[in-house]
Image (cartoon, rainbow, N blue to C red):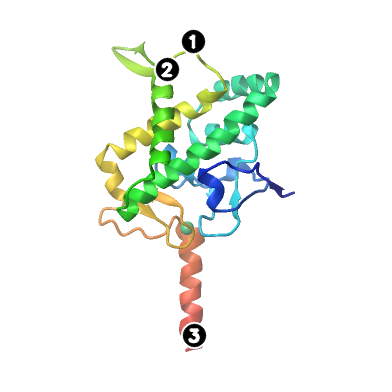
Amino acid sequence: VARELPEPQDTIGKKGMMSTRHDLTQIQLIGGDLSLDFVNSVHDRFEEPAEDYLGDFADLATWALVAGGISSEEKRRLENLARNNAQEAERVYAEALQLREAIHALYVSLLEGTEVPGRDLERVNRWLSGSMANLVLEPRGERFEFAWSEANYGLESVLWPLTRSIAALVTSDRVDRLKQCPACGWLFLDSSKNMSRRWCSMETCGNRAKARRFYQQSKS
Ligand SMILES: [Zn+2]
């Protein structure tokens, strides 16, 4: 059953989006980075309306687990919190979609060499400082590891790992490998040696393009 998303206030407004139920455990994670996979929870980016895989907060939590952002224990915790505060869950969900579109805008500006819209950068930065304030060190064996503080754990915590991942990616050399699938607009890091990867995945967009080429050749 398709249903409309709540009317977004700013960043999403440009393009229509439609949410349909998806089996999120089957979602393709081809981005090579959590923040890219998050952006790719819309398919496809060139369609009108685009299809949104995330229909509510529960979807967001399931997606975060499948994509490797949170543990199953965290997911259970988030679901409990959401059950006890449906309104807040709805708000965080709406914010998550706005953050996702802001992250998308950041990556697209990198790809196109254009200036990132101020409000998108602001939104990402706001989430970045909010999230990083909850980063703590935890002893692990002979070293320490980053962990998320228990003190402020809440519904918004579902987005903490994401904001950390976008910050890490855009400040590293890895971002030089950022590409956009010409068929569907999904973003990914090309980890091939000679940077020859073109499609998000050969099984979907790559094969479709091949079939189209074959059809056109056989016609002429
Ligand atoms: Zn594609």
Q: Position of residue 85 (x, y in %)?
A: 67, 21
* Residue on which disc 3 sits: 218
Between 196 and 81, the one nearer to me in the picture: 81
Real-space Cα distance between discs 3 and 2? Answer: 59 Å
The mark that comes first in sequence, 1 or 3, is 1
In this rendering, the answer to whether 94 lies above or below 133 is: below
What kind of residue is marked 1? Answer: Ala
Circle 2 sits on which residue? Answer: 134
* Residue ranking furthest to the right: 1
Q: What element does badge 3 sit on?
A: helix
Please name the residue shown 60% across and 52% down the image: 51
N-terminal-most mark, 3 or 2 = 2
Q: Which residue is mark 1?
A: 151
User: Callout 2, which amino acid?
Assistant: Asn
Question: Can I make out residue 136 in this image?
Answer: yes
Indicate which label's residue lies in the foreground, 1 or 3: 1
Q: Are marks 2 and 1 in contact (CB under 8 Å)?
A: yes
Q: Quadrant of residue 23?
A: top right
How many residues crowd mark 2 within 10 Å: few (<14), some (14–19), many (20+)? Answer: some
Asked whether the residues under the numbered discs 1 and 3 touch, taking CB atoms below 8 Å apart as contact, a structural biologist would say: no
Q: What is the secondary structure assignment of the residue under circle 1?
A: loop
At label 3, the amino acid type is Ser
Relative to 83, say whether 186 is above or below: below
